[in-house]
Image (spheres, grey):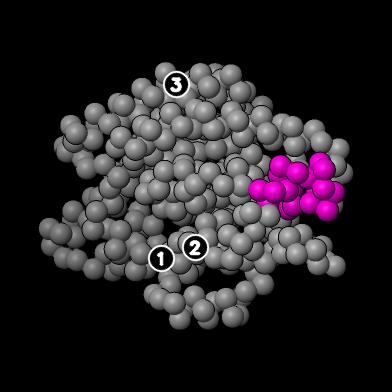
Amino acid sequence: MQKIAVFNHKGGVSKTTTVFNLGWMLAEQGKNVLMVDSDPQCNLTGMVLGFRGANDLEQFYQTQGENTIRSGVTPAFEAQPRSIQAVEPVPVSGRTGLHLLAGDLRLAEYEVTLGIAQELSAAIQALQNLPGSLNFLIDETARAIGADYVLIDMSPGLGAINQNLVTISDYLLLPTSPDIFSVMAIDSLARILPRWQAWATQASNMPVLRDAAYPFPDLSLKVLGTVVQKFRPRKGSPAKAFQQWINEIDGAVESRLHPALEGAGLLLDPAVYAASGVAKSLNLALIADFNSLISRSQEHSTPVFALTEEQLSAAGDVLDNFITSRNAFHADFSNLATRIDKMIQDSQV
């Protein structure tokens, strides 16, 4: 079982959409997948379950409130006399092999406590179980369903929860969008990720954390690469204005992020990237904006590439255009899932 964190501290780069579509495609390709909604906004949970409003959310938490990421780690954070156990994930309707560990707005309440624990757990032994608790919960839940892959949807931000989830993961995927803020985020990540890795290395070597009831794990984090999304295509390629920003992102990764990751030991073996045709820009895929297909996707809780003709709800030329776009997105996500799976399998050799 391999954990993939899907993270960028810039918002609006389609992290949730990437997790949902990539998770569905991996399951379509025969993998057993657990998606984890760690974002207190719970957008992935809403997308999967097809919530239409607050009443739907309220009903879910009234009936399934003990099966969320927050309730799962409550024993550690509130010092309850019971151990963390696997929670029951939600089977995703329409896709065998795909499951959701539901999000919870109240997970944000644990942010400050986790931050304190990650800084002071060596000095305050009562905090020693917190840094490893999320990893323990996710692993136990994933093992209970026999997951091959865990995809972790994360909030934008640089808080303790995101720091924890990135560093306990096996791999990191970085969604971006073609704009100046994504370029700025790449520069920022070149500083942040090595710093987080240095903290995690220290944490994993602390006897007080290694010997905790929920041990902080040994490190295995490697960066897979970036996915650039939400550009407007023109004749099958990104329009000129978007291509310029894609080039800027690729350049920032190659000249600034790649060397920083290499220095921190966060890259795969160069032969793994080469075997999958990934250059030093680490660009794994270009995926265009979903445009009007996104509303159908949200309405039916189904990825754009899996929408049926009935769900597309159109006729004539409009339907033909929808089908062409749907099929193109299917190819895009199929190629991305295949590439990621190959890179991970090659890295295990």
Residue at point 36% right, 22% down?
Answer: 251
What amino acid is at disc 1?
Ser
> In the orientation shown, which residue stands out farthest toward the left?
317
What amino acid is at disc 2?
Cys
Q: Do the residues labelled 2 and 3 touch (CB within 8 Å)?
A: no
Q: Which mark is residue 42?
A: 2
Give neighbour class at mark 2: few <14, some 14-19, many 20+ (Cα, 10 Å).
some
Q: Is residue 120 magenta?
A: yes
Give neighbour class at mark 3: few <14, some 14-19, many 20+ (Cα, 10 Å).
some
What residue is disc 3 on? 256
Q: Are marks 1 and 2 in contact (CB under 8 Å)?
A: no
Q: On the image, which quarter does residue 230 sit in? A: top left
Question: From this viewpoint, is residue 29 visible?
Answer: no
Quadrant of the rendering where the C terminus is positioned: top right
Among the two numbered marks 1 and 3 on one chain, the one whose residue lies closer to the N terminus: 3
How far apart are labels 1 and 3 at the CA level? 38 Å
Name the one closer to the observer, 175 or 318: 175
Q: Give the range drawn in magenta.
A: 114-134
Residue at point 36% right, 36% down?
Answer: 182
Question: Helix, strand, or loop for circle 2?
Answer: loop
Q: Of tags 1 and 3, which is closer to the observer? A: 3
Q: Is residue 42 magenta?
A: no
Residue at point 49% right, 63% down?
Answer: 42
Among the two numbered marks 1 and 2 on one chain, the one whose residue lies closer to the N terminus: 2
Q: Of tags 1 and 2, which is closer to the observer? A: 2
Q: Is 193 positioned to the left or the right of 49 in the image? A: right
Name the one closer to the observer, 319 or 143: 143
Q: Which mark is residue 301?
A: 1
What amino acid is at disc 3?
Arg
Q: Is 2 positioned to the left or the right of 191 in the image? A: right
Q: Residue 148 carries which label?
A: none
Estimate the x, y position of residue 140 in percent, counting from the top left.
73, 55
